[in-house]
Image (spheres, rainbow, N blue to C red):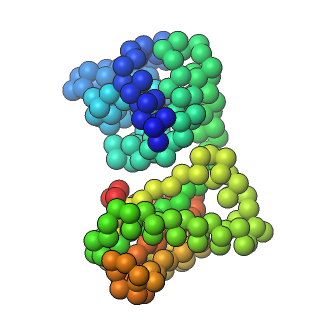
Amino acid sequence: MEEVVELLRKTMSEPVEPKDEGEKKEDSKNGIVFTEGDDQVDPVLLGPLISMGMDERLASKALVCTDNKSVDAALSWIAELGAEEMEALCGSTDHGSEGSEEWEDCEEEDDDDETYYKMVFVVNTELSMGVGKVAAQVGHGALGLYRLLRDDLEKYEASTEEWEECGERKITLKGKDSQELVALQKKAEGLHLPTYLVQDAGRTQVAPGSVTVLAIFGDDQAVDEVTGHLKLL
């Protein structure tokens, strides 16, 4: 985590040079120049990210990978990056660097409509659990779901390996109550997505059997059909 924070600080202090390629347009509202292409970046969403001090190339990649869904979705995608991934995407201000080559490789992968996978954890906010308790329950959900995936390699090996190779993305969301978590699990199972519902032993903070976290694994599009309307925790 300290490495990621340090990299963010570094990118905030480095100037960003405009790209030389492609036809460019300017968003009059935000004064942002962007390049037209197959993977266009929404300047309305890019503006707030840059105003936070985010590296323009990192922010643009996050928006492309989240289909320009929202600022929150882009921030969540960035938060799931490892230190090495972030450094590779930010690269240096020299656009002929190895970092920029990795950026181009990533864009080529996007053009090929590659499928990306993620784990999502829906936390039961009705229980008002402390931060440590939430962390422990999400941990239970991650381990439980991962064991389920590893127990059925014939079905999940390929998708699990793809998830592991692409940074093992994990996103935590807010759920209203246990009823909503159960309903979301049923919807996910209807789409043939593997799930794991955490029920606490009740040793601290919550009653025994309390539904604390729902974990779901699958490709981005399928998982978003279930949890796309929920807010980040």
Left or right: 54 in relation to 91: left
Task: Name the image quarter holding the C terminus.
Answer: bottom left
In the rendered picture of this protein, how many numbered marks are placed on residues?
Answer: 0
> Which residue shows up at 59% across the image and 13% down it?
96
Position of residue 32 measured from the top left corner of the image (x, y, whole percent): 31, 22
In this view, which residue lies farthest toward the right? 154
Q: Please name whichever residue, 107 or 141, is drawn nearer the observer in this view of the structure.
A: 141
Image height of 110 relative to 6, above or below: below
Residue ID at (51%, 42%): 81
Would residue 121 be found to the left or right of residue 47 on screen?
A: right
Residue 66 in picture, x, y percent from top left: 46, 45
Is residue 95 in sight in this rendering? yes
Regarding residue 56, the answer to whether it shows in the image is no
In the rendered image, the residue lying farthest to the left is: 29
Q: Residue at x 67, y 47 (%)?
A: 165
Residue beneath the point at 57% across and 28% down? 88
Q: Is residue 18 above or below residue 119?
A: above
Q: Can you give x and y, in whole percent of width and height, for residue 134 in the image?
A: 39, 66
Against 9, residue 154 (above or below) is: below
- Report whether 207 appears left or right of 221: left
| Image quadrant assignment for residue 26 | top left
Residue 177 location, x and y as percent?
32, 77
Compare residues 89 and 112 and report the one nearer the observer. 89
User: As rendered, which of 159 and 115 lies closer to the eye?
Assistant: 159
Frontmost residue, 205 versus 145: 205
Q: Decide: is 109 above or below 194.
A: above
Residue, far bottom: 208
